[in-house]
Image: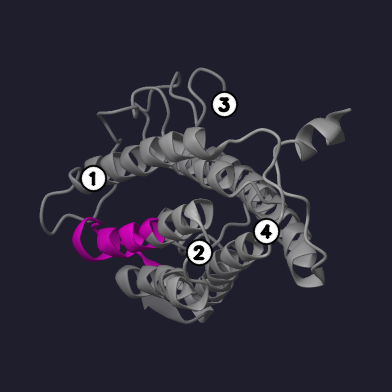
Amino acid sequence: MVMSTFLSFIFAPPPSLVVSTMSVVSLVSLANAGLSEIRGKHLNYSKFWNANPSSEKQIKLSSKTGMLLLYTPAFLAALASFWIFPHEGLRSTLLQSAVTLHFFKRDFEVLFIHKYSGGMLLDSAIPITLSYFLSAATMVYAQHLTQGLPEPPINLLYPGIVMFVVGIIGNFYHHYLLSNLRAKGEKEYKIPKGGLFGIVICPHYLFEIIQFYGISFISQTLYAFCFTLGTTFYLLGRSYSTRKWYLSKFEDFPKNVKAIIPFVF
């Protein structure tokens, strides 16, 4: 019953070993990364860049360099897809546009919005870069494989567009609020304020999840939903650790502020 309902929302899974394997790998690896965050084994970037004991012996990148490394290959892969798979219909074009815009926004924020205080370890940057690059390439390729297939019985394209727009705007807005917490030259962390920061400490993650569900609704492929579900698990774990970090650093951090889901978690 559950499976038949789910299949009414997606294209028939393609007979592609690569896409099927990537669907499982993305879901499992991202969910495991989320569990690792909860257990205290963090990917070393942002406020957790030096959280693990062995981090002092590893290669450190500046935050700006590391973040450009994370997002640029995925942006270029998504951009190249317009030449590799041109004119494949409205759904495919919207999917390519959404993925390209997502990673373009990330590079834009790295260059012009974010303010930095820490660093990023190369050992963390490499798997994240590969994850983003492979996810962008696989998502577009999985969409390409839907050419000629019947549309899913339930069309989620237009709700997906709305969710994507809400997600990308909300994510950008809260990144902008975070950047304004520090004056020029300041590097210390502060308790975020404004927007939804009064009820959750990671509203930017919440809107990123909304954005990826928007992409999944536009795509309606098994891979897109697997990647998005895995990303949800990872950001739940990362936000849990972020809230725990703020509680440990600031005695006046409001206990009623949740991690990522308002009033719940």
**Three-letter amino acid code at the position of disc 3:** Phe
**Three-letter amino acid code at the position of disc 4:** Thr
| Of pointers 1 and 2, the one earlier in the residue sequence | 2
Q: Is residue 111 left or right of residue 23?
A: left
Q: CA distance from mark 1 to mark 3?
A: 23 Å
Q: Secondary structure at mark 3?
A: loop
* Magenta span contains residue 190: no
Reply above or below: 101 against 1.
Answer: below
Q: Are marks 2 and 4 in contact (CB under 8 Å)?
A: no
What is the crowding at mark 3: few (fewer than 14 residues within 10 Å), some, or many (at least 20)? few
Looking at the picture, tell me which residue is in the foreground, 103 or 179: 103
Q: Secondary structure at mark 2?
A: loop
Task: Identify the residue under disc 2.
Answer: 44
Reply above or below: 78 against 149.
Answer: below
| Of pointers 2 and 4, the one earlier in the residue sequence | 2
| Of pointers 4 and 3, the one earlier in the residue sequence | 4
Residue furthest right in the image:
1
Q: Residue at x 54, y 76 (%)?
A: 126
Task: Identify the residue under disc 3.
Answer: 265
Q: Which mark is residue 176?
A: 1
Rendering coords of residue 233 (x, y %):
64, 44
Task: Identify the residue under disc 4.
Answer: 146
**Three-letter amino acid code at the position of disc 1:** Tyr
What is the crowding at mark 4: few (fewer than 14 residues within 10 Å), some, or many (at least 20)? some
**Which image quarter holds the N terminus?**
top right
* Foreground tag (2 vs 4): 4
Q: Are marks 1 and 4 in contact (CB under 8 Å)?
A: no
* Foreground tag (1 vs 4): 4
Q: CA distance from mark 2 to mark 4?
A: 37 Å
Q: Residue at x 71, y 54 (%)?
A: 149
Q: Kindly tell me whether residue 221 is visible in this rendering.
A: yes
